[in-house]
């Protein structure tokens, strides 16, 4: 079946990496919107994050590897839209597993491209760390040159180029995501700072003036649901996506964290570097013109993290 958003039929969405941090918030969101969902994952990071969806007969689950041709053919069989989330995510994880980083983040996207039919639309998340280190003041839009610093950034930028060259693809250059998800990640910057504030009440801050953009995990799920619903009415191409009023320095983020975790303090240090050298202001004007805007604030996300930490205390989660 070819999905035609104008005809109002419910699309069938293949989500790879469905059990991950983004996927385990997205899959229930798509099911709630009436989509059929095929969730493909090797479940290396969580076996439990999608259990809440198991009662929904519109969900199919495939346990397998996105690098395996037969698995991908089977998963693609009746999909109208593909959201490939599977990956080795973050610079530290990619440096630890460079073979998997390249074969999963880039080569599996080439395989997907080869196997998908031209009418199977791809909605792909990449990272706005692809903009690399800038002067930290000029806003990066989608025409800004990409300059990824890490293996993670390079593998995502190469995968994005493969998809955009092939056509019928939209890529979302996501800000650093924050918030609570069934598969939790505490290595993401907001979640990490909040976790340290909760557990240690203090942290050592390096590159305090470096600025980046942030976005709530629920807003990312809404973005994909919006793009599924819009179909071809959303033009192909790259779109930045983050909270337009949250281009924040790490110091400004610490101040917000102190608001949610009273008593939190930090010490600024001249040593220490981010492997992705993220220092950029992001313009999200293009996706906002197309009709979608992130709305959930960093302080609201910090409040939900505080409630979650009361449950998670003592556990470890994340990719770092
Ligand atoms: N979280 C963020 O801040 C952020 C920002 C920008 C882009 N992204 C992108 O979004 C996607 C999802 O990120 P996340 O935060 O959910 O990461 P995650 O690590 O929580 O999830 C990745 C998922 O991929 C699965 N996976 C890994 N290798 C696989 C394989 N070979 N076959 C099948 N499944 C496999 C894992 O089991 C996991 O469920 C990634 O592509 C990432 O690059 C995330």
Image: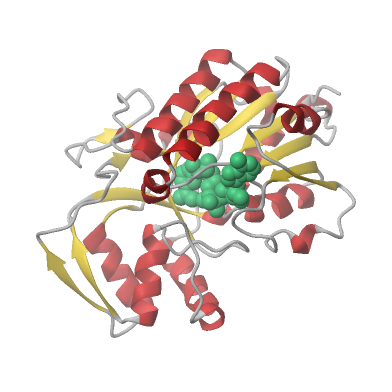
Q: Position of residue 78 (x, y in %)?
A: 83, 29
Task: Classify residue 181 as left or right of residue 314.
Answer: right
Which residue occupies 47% across, 67% down? Answer: 300
Q: Nearer the viewer, residue 218 or 161?
A: 161
Question: Is residue 117 visible to the viewer in this orientation of the structure?
Answer: yes
- Quadrant in which the C terminus is drawn: bottom left
Q: Is residue 110 left or right of residue 10?
A: left
Which residue ends up furthest to the left in the rendered image? 270
Q: What colour scheme has been applied to the protein in the rendered image?
A: secondary structure
Q: Which of the 4 image quarters holds residue 253?
A: bottom left
- Residue 152: % across, % down: 40, 39
User: Quarter holding the N terminus?
Assistant: top right
Q: Is residue 144 left or right of residue 270?
A: right
In the image, residue 136 sits, relative to residue 312, either above or below, namely above
Residue 158 or 294: which is nearer the viewer?
158
124 to 35, vertically: above or below:
above
Task: Give the quarter of the image for residue 258.
Answer: bottom left
**Residue 220 visible in this rendered orientation of the protein:** no
Instruction: State the image coordinates of residue 186 (x, y, percent, origin top left).
Output: 45, 64
Where in the figure is residue 277, as x and y percent of width and height? 24, 44
Residue at 48% across / 81% down in the picture? 314
Q: Is residue 162 left or right of residue 271?
A: right
Please tell me which residue lies in front, 90 or 121: 90
| Residue displayed at 50% across by 62% down | 179
Q: Nearer the viewer, residue 308 or 43?
A: 43
């Amino acid at each position: 079946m070819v999905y035609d958003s104008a005809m109002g039929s419910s699309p069938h969405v293949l989500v790879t990496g469905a059990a991950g941090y983004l996927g385990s918030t997205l899959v229930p969101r798509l099911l709630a919107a009436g989509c059929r969902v095929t969730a493909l994952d090797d479940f290396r990071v969580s076996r439990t994050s999608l259990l809440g969806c198991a009662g929904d007969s519109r969900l199919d689950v495939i346990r397998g590897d996105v690098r395996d041709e037969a698995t991908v053919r089977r998963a693609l069989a009746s999909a109208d839209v593909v959201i490939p989330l599977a990956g080795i995510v973050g610079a530290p994880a990619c440096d630890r597993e460079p073979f998997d980083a390249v074969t999963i983040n880039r080569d599996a996207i080439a395989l997907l491209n080869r196997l998908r039919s031209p009418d199977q639309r791809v909605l792909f998340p990449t990272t706005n760390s692809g903009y690399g280190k800038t002067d930290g003041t000029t806003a990066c839009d989608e025409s800004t040159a990409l300059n990824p610093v890490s293996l993670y950034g390079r593998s995502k930028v190469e995968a994005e180029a493969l998809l955009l060259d092939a056509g019928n693809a939209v890529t979302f250059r996501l800000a650093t995501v924050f918030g609570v998800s069934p598969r939790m990640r505490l290595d993401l910057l907001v979640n990490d700072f909040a976790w340290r504030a909760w557990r240690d009440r203090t942290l050592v801050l390096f590159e305090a003036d470096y600025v980046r953009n942030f976005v709530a995990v629920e807003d990312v799920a809404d973005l994909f649901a919006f793009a599924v619903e819009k179909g071809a009415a959303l033009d192909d191409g790259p779109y930045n996506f983050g909270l337009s009023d949250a281009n924040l320095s790490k110091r400004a983020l610490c101040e917000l964290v102190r608001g949610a975790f009273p008593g939190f303090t930090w010490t600024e240090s001249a040593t220490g570097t981010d492997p992705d050298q993220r220092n950029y202001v992001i313009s999200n004007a293009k996706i906002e013109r197309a009709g979608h805007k992130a709305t959930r604030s960093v302080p609201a996300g910090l409040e939900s993290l505080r409630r979650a930490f009361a449950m998670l205390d003592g556990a470890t989660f994340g990719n770092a």
